[in-house]
Amino acid sequence: MTNFASSDEPPDQWIDDIRPTNPRGDQYQSPSSSSSGAAATLAGYSWLDQSIGADTGGSIRAPATANGLFSLRPSWNTTSMDGIGAIYPDFDVVGILGRNLQSIHDLLSLTHDVDDVKEFPSKILYPEDFFPHSNKSQQAMVDNFVTVLEHFLGARAIRFSLAERWRQNPPSETGDRSITEYLAQSAFWPMCYSYYHTYEGFRKSYREKYGSEPYVGPVVRFRWGIGETVSQQDFHKGRAELQVFRQWFDANVLSSDPVTMSDAIMIMPYGMGGPKYRDAPNSAPSTSSTISEKLISPALQMPQLVIPTGQNPYGSRVSGRTEYRPIGTTILGARGSDLMLINLAKAALEWACWPTEVQTGPLMFELGEGVRHTADVAEGDSGDGKRLAPEENQGFSLNRVNAAISSARMLKPTQPLFRALRRLALTTKMVNGGFYKGNRTGSMGRHTKGGGYIIEWRKVRTYVAPANLAEFKVACFMMKDLHAWELTGIAAHPVYQRSTYPRPWRLCRRSDGPAER
């Protein structure tokens, strides 16, 4: 941990203590700052289950992305801060780091006052003020993750601009000022004021005992310097401005919900896309905007979940070979939606057969193909990186089918078939462009010579190839009045008519006769 829980990073800001070693990649990457020791040890030692640390302006989230871990910055004021060193009480929370989502869920349930809900919102917010990443590979991983959420929740991400939404409907207190102008000194400056005055007694005692000022690192010195210049009036003004921002955000962007705890989730970036060597000099300390990846969740007092989503290759100047940098994406929800965010992330990752646990050592995940450079895992896997083996002669994974069926219970039975399939078609594509309308199966014969299935719901029919059997099974599991035919060549054979709900069924082949109910 850095001195005074600061954002000092090696080599030239970490002076009096030896920095921890980041076990990822070539092991010469910066472990980040503040609670970096809590992150580096968890990423390096399998006998540790969780670690904790205070998060004011990124002390848990930054080490999580640098060291390749899951982490949660919880909702503000959901657990006691007694005995925990403070920087800014309006922002301070106890954050949790973990190698898997379940461990964070379990610890949070025991230590924080938040409700455990398994109903999820159907709205995904994508603020373009923060995207795209300058690193194209990192952005591709974000896009991949957003696609998972879109298909899992059955919703398109809403791309919008916070700045534009503010401009169109600003709070009355702001006048003609933009969101960045109004909040220019609302977060960082009050935080520095509190940081400086919190340690006033320490500095006084040190001077009385040693006759000099204590040595502190460059970042602490910079922030104390700002805090010394902020008046008490400006401190309270900044706090009032953030209260206006929270009320506006709740009314115009994202708010609480009695069922899902949050009426939406919001995608946010965090962390770098490329290497950051621990022997490379840092840039000079600087201020942080309220509307930034570091401060927006503290300013809004909302939970923010860091999710490792991939690993980005780079040519290491240390090892002389290709190494991999952990990449994370984050989601935010309304205050109190902490456990919902964890449950949602876990369910979505399992459904997509993405790992829900990271490994210790140089790699978060076993290497795989695709933009994430990560191998899929089997359903129920703890994240050891086992590859999925396709079911023999079917072109699909039985694990993927089972994961899809598990998640399908959240579908509404009245949803149109094409929406249900779009929601579930994460890893496979419908043959020849997808959906075909008509009253006769023969009109689709030219598309179905390889065999497969035709399904119909409310006079809408679509051809399903064997590789899309996962989606087919889920649709039939959930929907009333659904007819299915198995095809051989261009011939259609009625084998099943679904008229009851929600009893499960066994997929039958033409030779099997009627399906079991």
Image (cartoon, rainbow, N blue to C red):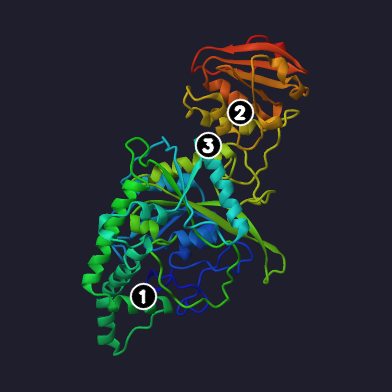
Task: Using the image, tell me which numbered label, if any, was put on residue 184.
Answer: none
Q: Nearer the viewer, residue 215 or 121?
A: 121
Q: On the picture, is 353 further left or further right than 219? A: right
Measuring 27% from the left and 56% from the top, which residue is drawn there?
244
Tell me which corner region of the image, top left, top right, bottom left or bottom right, holds residue 449.
top right
Q: Earlier in the sequence, mark 3 or mark 2?
A: 3
Q: Earlier in the sequence, mark 1 or mark 3?
A: 3
Q: Position of residue 9 (x, y in %)?
A: 49, 72
Reading the image, the residue beneath label 2 is: 471
Q: Nearer the viewer, residue 409 or 158?
A: 158
Question: Secondary structure beneath disc 2?
Answer: helix
Question: Secondary structure beneath disc 3?
Answer: helix
Q: Nearer the viewer, residue 81 or 259?
A: 259
**Proximity of marks 1 and 2: CB atoms separated by less than 8 Å:** no
Figure quadrant of the N terminus: bottom left
Q: Is residue 99 above or below residue 220?
A: above
Reading the image, the residue beneath label 1 is: 223
Reading the image, the residue beneath label 3 is: 152
- Which residue is situated farthest in the left direction here? 233
